[in-house]
Image (cartoon, grey):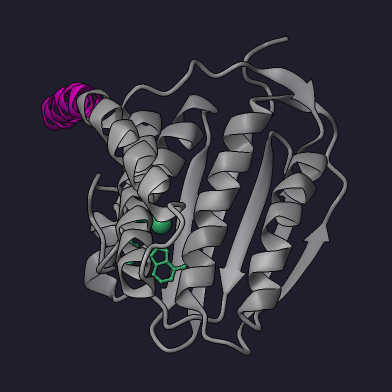
Amino acid sequence: MREEMTRMDRLASLGKISAGIAHEIRNPLTGITLLLDDLHDRPGLDPNTQLMIGHALTETERVERLISSLLSYSSPPRASFVRSDLNAAVQEGLVLFRKACEKQGVELTASCQPIPLFPFDADQVRQLLLNLLGNALEAVAPGGRITIGTFCTADCAGITVADTGPGIPEEDIPRLFEPFFTRKSAGTGLGLSIVQRIVEEHHGNIRIESKVGQGTVFTVELAMGWPDC
Ligand code: ADP
Ligand code: MG
């Protein structure tokens, strides 16, 4: 219990510091992006300079994405629970993803079981799904497969995201939900921390089954009786 409080305290102060820094960086970054945009579109620019400005813009976009992740991790909007259709939320998330999968030659299939309406935050659940799908897509090679499923138990509604990627080494599993833990050169290490926070707000749980060389399955369960409305 004591250890758990320490972890929560650490995460809370980390969150506050990150949010402060993220806000401070965002304003000058917007200025830099506007200036680069303006330079990039100037007539008569030699192609090499234009290319370099293009690269600089790509890097500013990367910082902007990192800041968005930091802010959604450290100062998330309060969850708003509305009785909704989980399968519809999953389908909306998939629409955003189908193109990216096609582009990479990855097969995306979904198998959804009927789930009664229950209160959840659809925006947050879409965010959760996009984070899990993003990781799956980054993990699988062309020709690989991502399979989404939904299911329902007596008191929980669930989502599974399975991929045929390289799997996760056993020693990494306990660290996956640590903020900033990443094995990617351009990763933020915040995707799964955000997933975990959303799951906690929905009084749910998350499980990982992974075999190196075979793939990974993330299973998220959301409590259907929370909050009581
Ligand atoms: P990021 O994607 O920015 O690295 P995440 O919190 O989303 O941060 O993921 C943390 C780490 O978990 C990843 O760097 C990767 O090592 C591992 N991981 C997550 N999902 C998968 C997956 N589907 N297959 C393999 N590794 C994964
Ligand atoms: Mg990620």
Judge whether residue 9 is colored magenta.
Answer: yes
Percent coordinates x, y for residue 21 in the rendering? 18, 28
Q: Does the image show residue 35?
A: yes
Pick whichever, 227 or 146, lies toward us: 146
Q: What are the residue bounds of the magenta stretch?
A: 1-21
In the figure, is residue 85 to the left or right of 182?
right
Q: Which residue shows up at 61% across the image and 79% down it? A: 104
Q: Residue at x 55, y 28 (%)?
A: 202
Considering depth in this image, is 113 or 11 the residue closer to the camera? 11
- Residue 150 showing in the rendered view: no
- Number of marks: 0
Q: Is residue 139 left or right of residue 66?
A: right
User: From the viewer's perspective, is 179 left or right of 197?
Assistant: left
Relative image position of residue 33 (x, y in whole percent): 35, 41
- Residue 106 location, quadrant: bottom right
* Quarter placement of the C terminus: top right
Quadrant in which the N terminus is drawn:
top left
User: Is 138 situated left or right of 69 in this image?
Assistant: right
Query: In the rendered image of this protein, does residue 37 appear above or below residue 182?
Result: above
Q: Quadrant of residue 224?
A: top right
Residue at left 29%, top 52%? Answer: 188
Q: Quadrant of ligand 2?
A: bottom left
Residue 137: image quadrant is bottom right
Q: Residue furthest top?
A: 229
Q: In the image, is residue 227 above or below residue 133?
A: above
Main secondary structure of the magenta stretch: helix
- Residue 131, compared with residue 127, is above or below; it is below
Q: Position of residue 98 (x, y in %)?
A: 72, 64
User: Where in the figure is residue 117, as x and y percent of width and height?
Assistant: 83, 29
